[in-house]
């Protein structure tokens, strides 16, 4: 760091601004599709399975790439990975803009996910490097976290507004241009940082984890067409073998990508399980809400974007306010309580039919939004303190990988529930029945997640506080 306090503050502000802008763009791009997937799917000739892939492919790329992105950022340069991620996201977004088929669009979205993983992991790592532990870092990471909710809220509205006046492909051209400008901003303003002691690159762990996660998500996505089909069983079998191989490799690696000793830490388990169940039980279902609003209520893309904005917007508002619970309620209990509120909110969305008013969605979305805000804020702190200070980027990456793996599987799970919904009464009626079933199942999954997180009890509050102090001391030394 520079010895000039004025220069340091200026550099820190620029780093925070760039990281927050990139995070906002990543989440905006992540959710932009949910309000326009029916239009894009119709133009590309996507069937039911194709639309599921359109929605889930970016989560697949994120889940498979986040942990390796965190490792590369810490060991090989956070600015370097940020710039590489920005360039890759720009190119992948152009591929989506010109995609002639569903397969090409899905490939572009998967690459977008991998590039987004690089931006998320390196961006938060850069913020953690320039802001020392204490109130300034809390404010900085709180602002960074708020951008997650802000991007989720803005994405569907952004794409729905543009599609009213132009072609959907223009959305991706504009996004590519903005990402390119932010990447250039990073090249000019960011300062490089990395760990002083570089770890060995765990190639075998990276390959087995990424391939295993990718095939697992592919199996869940294709399973909606029949779980006994040969290629679905093959995907599942090979995925389980690869993930078992990953565990075997990590136990023997000198510098593993994921230190399995972390699984003996209740805080790490709570962080990972909480993120996984948030993706599986909340984000996966909410991804389908705009589609359901269009199909069941006949809403326009913009109206459906505004509807899902109730959930994501309240999450954006609630996340910074959740910091007021610090010192009163431990972060693990905050995650559990937030998941309970999310689960109740989703269960409140059951029973919606084609005869319902859009107001029928509001109470459930309000509850789920408030719960999501608390969960997002608490998970960020839990992920950081659950790992050694010099592996903070990896801890954040593992947490986000679990979240996006869960969301990818959650999207496929809702699709499978819709496929098995009772037939008769028309398409709108069938979709309404299927979404009611999906809301109930997702709500129960969120409640199960709350119980699992609550069960990850740490030994004593005194030990927990001592562990936090030890992490802060180590962080200062690093």
Image (spheres, grey):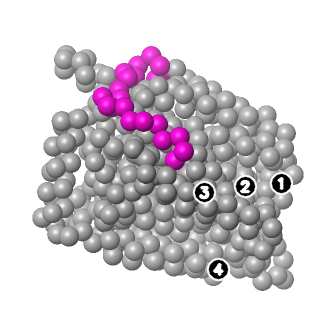
Q: Earlier in the sequence, mark 1 or mark 2?
A: 1
- The residue shown at (31%, 37%) is 128
Residue with the mark numbered 2: 53
| Quarter of the figure with residue 108 | top right
Q: Gap between marks 3 and 4, in whole Å?
A: 33 Å
Residue 386 screen position, x and y as percent: 30, 55
- Measured in 3D between alpha carbons, the distance from the residue under mark 4 to the one under mark 2, in whole angstroms, is 21 Å
Q: Is residue 225 or residue 20 the one in the foreground? A: 225
Q: Nearer the viewer, residue 110 or 356?
A: 110
Tell me the CA gap for discs 1 and 3. 30 Å
Badges 1 and 2: C-beta atoms under 8 Å apart?
A: yes
Instruction: Name the residue located 67 percent from the left edge and 35 percent from the top edge.
Output: 93
Answer whether residue 105 is magenta in the image: no
Residue at the spot x=45%, y=77% of the render?
447
| Circles 3, 4 touching at the beta carbon (< 8 Å) | no
The residue that disc 1 covers is 46
Q: Quadrant of residue 55?
A: bottom right
Quadrant of the snapshot with the C terminus = top left
| Callout in the foreground (4, 2) | 2
* 3 vs 4, front mark: 3
- Is disc 1 surrounded by few (<14), some (14 to 19) or many (20+) residues within 10 Å? many
The region drawn magenta spans 185-205
Give the number of the disc on residue 201.
none
Residue at the disc numbered 4: 437
In the displayed structure, 116 sits above or below 5; it is below
**Secondary element type, mark 2:** helix
Q: In this view, does 39 lie above or below 8?
A: below
């Amino acid at each position: 760091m520079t010895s000039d306090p004025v220069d340091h503050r200026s550099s820190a502000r620029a780093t925070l601004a760039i990281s927050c802008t990139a995070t906002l763009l990543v989440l905006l791009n992540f959710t932009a599709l949910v309000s326009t997937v029916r239009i894009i799917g119709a133009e590309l000739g996507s069937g039911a399975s194709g639309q599921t892939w359109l929605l889930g492919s970016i989560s697949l790329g994120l889940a498979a790439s986040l942990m390796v992105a965190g490792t590369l950022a810490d060991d090989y340069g956070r600015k370097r990975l940020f710039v590489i991620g920005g360039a890759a996201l720009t190119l992948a977004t152009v591929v989506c803009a010109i995609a002639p088929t569903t397969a090409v669009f899905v490939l572009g979205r998967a690459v977008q996910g991998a590039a987004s993983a690089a931006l998320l992991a390196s961006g938060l790592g850069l913020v953690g490097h320039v802001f020392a532990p204490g109130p300034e870092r809390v404010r900085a990471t709180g602002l960074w976290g708020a951008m997650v909710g802000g991007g989720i809220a803005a994405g569907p509205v952004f794409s729905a507004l543009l599609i009213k006046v132009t072609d959907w492909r223009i959305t991706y051209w504009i996004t590519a241009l903005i990402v390119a400008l932010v990447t250039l901003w990073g090249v000019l303003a960011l300062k490089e940082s990395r760990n002083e002691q570089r770890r060995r690159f765990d190639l075998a762990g990276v390959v087995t984890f990424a391939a295993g996660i990718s095939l697992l998500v592919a199996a869940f996505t294709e399973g909606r067409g029949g779980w006994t089909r040969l290629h679905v069983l093959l995907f599942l079998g090979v995925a389980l073998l690869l993930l078992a191989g990953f565990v075997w490799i990590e136990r023997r690696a000198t510098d593993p990508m994921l230190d399995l000793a972390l699984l003996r830490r209740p805080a790490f388990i709570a962080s990972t399980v909480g993120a996984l169940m948030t993706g599986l039980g909340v984000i996966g279902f909410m991804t389908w809400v705009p589609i359901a609003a269009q199909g069941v209520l006949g809403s326009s893309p913009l109206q459906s974007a505004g509807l899902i904005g109730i959930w994501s917007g309240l999450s954006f508002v609630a996340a910074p306010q959740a910091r007021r619970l610090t010192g009163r309620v431990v972060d693990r209990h905050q995650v559990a309580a937030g998941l309970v509120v999310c689960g109740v909110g989703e269960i409140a969305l059951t029973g919606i039919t084609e005869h319902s008013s859009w107001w029928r969605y509001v109470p459930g979305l309000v509850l789920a939004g408030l719960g999501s805000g608390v969960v997002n804020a608490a998970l960020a702190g839990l992920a950081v303190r659950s790992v050694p200070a010099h592996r903070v980027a990896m801890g954040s990456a593992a947490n986000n990988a679990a979240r996006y793996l869960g969301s990818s599987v959650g999207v496929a799970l809702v699709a499978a529930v819709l496929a098995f919904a009772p037939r008769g009464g028309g398409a709108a009626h069938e979709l309404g029945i299927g979404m009611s079933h999906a809301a109930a199942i997702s709500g129960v999954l969120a409640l199960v997640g709350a119980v699992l997180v609550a069960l990850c009890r740490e030994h004593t509050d005194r030990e927990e506080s001592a562990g936090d102090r030890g992490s802060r001391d180590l962080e200062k030394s690093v």
